[in-house]
Image (cartoon, rainbow, N blue to C red):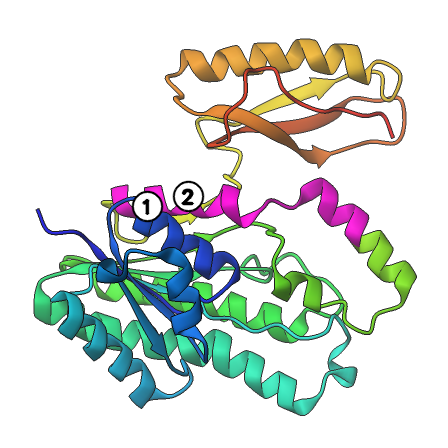
Amino acid sequence: MAAHTVVVTGSTRGVGFGLVSAFLERGCNVVVHGRSKAADAAAKLGFPERVLAFDGDVTDAGSVRALWDTAEQRFGRVDVWVNNAGSGGALVPVAQLPLETCSSVVATNLTGCVLGTRVALEGMLRLGGGQIFNMEGFGSNPHIKRTGMAVYGATKCAVRYFTQSVSREVKGSTVKVGTLSPGIVVTQMLVGQFDGAPAAQWERSRRFYNKVADTVETVAPYLAERVLANEKNGAAIAWIQPAADAGAHRVTVSGWPGAVRGAAAAEDAVAARRCYSRGASSSFSHWRSASLSSTPAASSFWVRRSTVGCTPPCFSWSAK
């Protein structure tokens, strides 16, 4: 069986580079793409016979088509196409965001996604099938808002709508279209939001992300494995799974904050055993807080599965 060929746009760094690394480790041919220096990023991966570098602009239709053509010519086909290229900007209100930044964020995040999907869909239908995944981000859930994320969030909300619509259009065909959601990941784009921000704002944000963010090395392999195993059109592959995920269990701790440590440790062990009893092959790494009361009342937490290995219970709880 021939190796899968995977194209990931915007893959010279961050989550994109993590994805091409993970796909390569799983036997795939990969195409490293970026506005510039794709060859430098590709060289870090090794395996030159299975890695192709391409410099291009996802906002230019001709460049996106050339990316497909080059990949097909080199490897014979493209099995997976991930529209990952993205742009952010400073975390400031719209009135303070430069017009050039507004334009580039919309062009990269939305236009790039549309063009990539259009080109890949045409090629995959011609060659007999494949999978297209579009990257979600803050704003994909339209009910969550944050000051300074209006433009970026609007593009990600639109990406979800676009992806779900195209998924309906290809139903019954040989092409599957879905989304990837990496959660909060420490990348240059995340940190770059705070360029020029007051030191106090950055310090608060740094403490927050140290608690909730994951690393590329943790998230990318998880996503890559599920992409390769996927058989569903309209799949929404997410690192932080919703509550209905088979590996997620609500842990309720009463008497906050005094009883948190002891009660949580006991509940963790129970939740972990339940997960394993349901056939989970992965292990737990850490927790996500669903609601944390500051008063002596019940507080609820979600615990979830992870590909990071540890022996349950292995959670770090605090009563701060």
Q: Judge from the rendering whether residue 247 lies leftward or rightward of residue 204; answer left or right.
A: left
Which label number is shown at residue 221?
Answer: 2
Using the rendered view, name the quadrant where residue 149 is placed: bottom right
Q: Which residue is mark 1?
A: 25
Name the mark nearer the viewer: 1 or 2: 1
Q: CA distance from mark 1 to mark 2?
A: 9 Å
Q: Which percent across, then down, holds residue 236? A: 39, 49
Q: Which percent across, then down, holds residue 12? A: 46, 67
Amino acid found under the numbered disc labelled 1: Glu
Q: Are marks 1 and 2 in contact (CB under 8 Å)?
A: yes
Part of the protein shown in magenta: 206-229
Using the rendered view, name the quadrant where residue 35 is placed: bottom left
Q: Judge from the rendering whether residue 279 lies leftward or rightward of residue 147; answer left or right.
A: left
Q: Residue at x 62, y 57 (%)?
A: 143
Magenta stretch: dominant SS?
Answer: helix
Instruction: Please tell me which residue lies in front, 258 or 66.
Output: 66
- Residue 254 in the magenta stretch? The answer is no
Using the rendered view, name the quadrant where residue 229 is placed: top left
Q: Mark 2: which secondary structure?
A: helix
Q: Residue at x 43, y 70 (%)?
A: 40
- Residue 218 in the magenta stretch? The answer is yes
Asked if residue 146 is positioned above or below residue 220 in the image, the reply reads: below
Q: Which percent across, then down, holds residue 66? A: 26, 83
Q: Which percent across, then down, holds residue 279? A: 37, 17
